Image (cartoon, grey):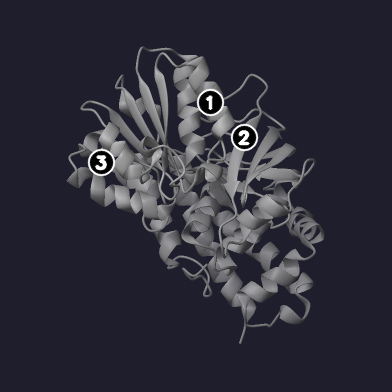
């Protein structure tokens, strides 16, 4: 049986040569759609979106990247014929024994459908850089399975604290995952990412175990994922961070510190034990520097050696500290977000003051929240990404399995 995934995997084993052929195929026919440096990112991302079984978050990240490229390079629907022909010829040439003639029609249908998704996303994402290469400058293993990467982009990234951006390692070309910078924009342009190796994951273990200083990463366009500080107005903040969900919330704290507004911030950081509180030193420095308005509270759910005030699960601790009028932000693993979505409104937290990070596990959560706040562009993007989620618009082998 013909297998799109197999043919792509064999092709990407020679990724640089395949991407060069993809670009040259169009160039030789007078179709100048992409600058050469963008061809590897475009080719591998398009191929992965069509052929592979990546998780919903990965598919949405790929659509965001392709959407920005589609807009930046002013692609049009009639370009799909040339792009599909180049893609098919490239896979046919490099797939070896993984190629079967019946794959040509599958690749063409998948390519046209993926490009229609990119076209829809392009209108919502707006203008801006598409993909920015960045060099990993420092790597630190901060706890079991968690690493902190400091990256120096080749050009300054445009993002706001609380946003997330697609990140890809060329070790796994075209496989994108969402990560939020753990810092507000810095004068030197450097960004810090907190990465946990997810059991059974594909990309995160590579970022934690194999990426080293000097490696390059691809950084896609930043997108709102429901954690914008603007949505809080001038309200005091209660930030509840589970695991590496701390990253965007720490960036929000830095944003408040850069523009003192008189608001008070309580940051509740959940972990299993004290040893799992991987960013303790940075948090201590933040609290020392801004103790007049910042309070950091640990919530350790499985550590009986710490003082009783620090024992408890994250949401229970946050609810205990919650005060009327606070804007309540929650970021962490999908199960935490789902629990917060059900538990916090039931406990009396007003829905208009509750800001939950997108999980990307079903519909685009941030887009749904955005549509409630009257953002038609965000709701439109949600529609495009829901199509990517169920696989109805892509290749024949696209599934929801990891």
Residue 118: image x %, image y %? 51, 52
Does the image show residue 76?
A: no
In the picture shown, does residue 278 fall above or below 205? above
Quadrant showing the N terminus = bottom right
Give the residue at mark 1.
284
Q: Which residue is mark 3?
A: 372
Residue found at x 52% / y 67%: 402
Work out how far the residue at label 1 is from the one at label 2, CA to CA, in angstroms.
17 Å
Asked if labels 2 and 1 touch by Cβ distance under 8 angstroms, the answer is no
**Does residue 362 appear left or right of residue 346 in this picture?**
right
In the image, 93: left or right of 173? right
**Residue 114's x, y, as percent?**
52, 60
What residue is drawn where x is 32% and y is 27%?
Answer: 232
* Residue drawn at 74 percent across, 71 percent down: 10
Q: CA distance from mark 1 to mark 3?
A: 37 Å
Based on the displayed image, in which of its 4 quarters is residue 321 positioned? top left
Q: Which mark is first along the chain, 3 or 1?
A: 1
Q: Residues within 10 Å of mark 1 (few under 14, many from 20)?
A: some
Disc nearer the start of the sequence (2/3): 2
């Amino acid at each position: 049986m013909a297998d799109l995934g197999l043919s792509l995997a064999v092709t990407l084993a020679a990724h640089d040569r395949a991407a060069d052929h993809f670009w040259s195929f169009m160039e030789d026919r007078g179709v100048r759609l992409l600058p050469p440096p963008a061809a590897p990112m475009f080719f591998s991302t398009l191929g992965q979106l069509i052929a592979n079984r990546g998780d919903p978050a990965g598919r949405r990240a790929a659509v965001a990247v392709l959407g920005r490229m589609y807009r930046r390079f002013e692609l049009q629907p009639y370009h799909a014929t040339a792009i599909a022909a180049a893609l098919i010829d490239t896979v046919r040439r490099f797939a070896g024994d993984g190629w079967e003639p019946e794959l040509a029609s599958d690749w063409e249908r998948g390519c046209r459908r993926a490009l229609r998704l990119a076209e829809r996303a392009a209108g919502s994402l707006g203008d801006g850089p598409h993909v920015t290469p960045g060099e990993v400058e420092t790597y630190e293993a901060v706890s079991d399975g968690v690493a902190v990467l400091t990256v120096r982009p080749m050009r300054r990234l445009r993002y706001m604290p609380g946003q997330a951006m697609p990140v890809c390692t060329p070790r796994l070309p075209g496989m994108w995952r969402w990560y939020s910078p753990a810092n507000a924009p810095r004068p030197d342009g450097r960004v810090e990412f907190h990465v946990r190796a997810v059991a059974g994951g594909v990309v995160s273990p590579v970022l934690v175990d194999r990426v080293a200083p000097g490696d390059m990463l691809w950084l896609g366009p930043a997108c709102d994922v429901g954690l914008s500080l603007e949505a809080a107005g001038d309200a005091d903040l209660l930030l509840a961070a589970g695991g590496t969900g701390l990253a965007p919330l720490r960036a929000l704290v830095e944003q408040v510190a850069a523009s003192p507004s008189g608001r008070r911030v309580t940051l509740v950081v959940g972990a299993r034990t004290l040893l799992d509180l991987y960013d303790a030193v940075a948090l201590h420095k933040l609290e020392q520097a801004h103790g007049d308005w910042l309070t950091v509270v640990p919530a350790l759910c499985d550590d009986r050696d710490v003082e009783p005030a620090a024992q408890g699960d994250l949401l229970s601790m946050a609810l205990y500290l919650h005060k009327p009028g606070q804007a309540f932000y929650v970021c962490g693993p999908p199960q935490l977000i789902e629990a917060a979505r059900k538990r916090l409104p039931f406990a009396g937290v007003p829905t208009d003051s509750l800001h939950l990070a997108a999980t990307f596990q079903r519909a685009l959560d941030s887009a749904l929240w955005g549509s409630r706040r009257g953002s038609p562009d965000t709701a439109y993007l949600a529609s495009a990404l829901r199509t990517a989620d169920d696989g109805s618009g892509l290749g024949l082998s696209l599934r929801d399995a990891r």
